[in-house]
Amino acid sequence: MANENSEGKAAATALYTHEVPDTAAGERLDKFLVQQRPELGRQGARWLTEQGLVRVNGARAVKARPLR
């Protein structure tokens, strides 16, 4: 777990933008993040979200937020 978390923290220094395809509608944000950026791992995606570093349409996102 330590590797996943430290990788997630390192990835926080970069800016990534992802467009959500229609096929991902209803999927949880945290799962989508891991699919798009596998190097984050679940812990890294959680850390980024908890730190307020994940935005959806400019607003801070919640990890369990369903995508639309």
Image: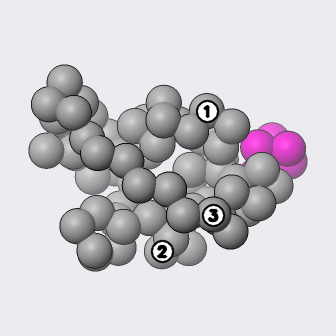
Residue in the picture at 76% in, 43% down: 4
Residue, disc 2:
52
Q: Earlier in the sequence, mark 2 or mark 3?
A: 3
Q: Position of residue 42 (x, y in %)?
A: 60, 40
The quarter of the picture where residue 51 lies is bottom right
Label 2, label 3: how far apart the Cα atoms are = 14 Å
Return the disc, 2 or 1, that comes first in the chain's sequence: 1
Residue 2 location, x and y as percent?
86, 48
> What is the quadrant of residue 13 in the picture?
bottom right
Identity of the amino acid at label 3? Ala
Mark 2 surroundings within 10 Å by alpha-carbon count, few (fewer than 14), some (14 through 19), many (20 or more): few
Extreme residue toward the top, this view = 23
Quarter location, residue 24: top left
Does 50 appear above or below 24? below
2 in magenta: yes
**Residue at the disc numbered 3:** 14
Please state which amino acid type lies under the numbered disc 2. Answer: Gly
Q: Quadrant of the N terminus?
A: top right
7 horizontally vs 24: left or right: right
Give the residue type that dot 1 points to. Answer: Pro
Q: Which residues are magenta?
A: 1-5
> Measured along the vertical axis of the image, is residue 54 above or below residue 22?
below
**Count of picture labels:** 3
Which element is circle 3 on? loop
* Most common secondary structure along the magenta stretch: helix
The residue located at (54%, 64%) in the rendering is 15
- Is 39 in front, or is 44? 39
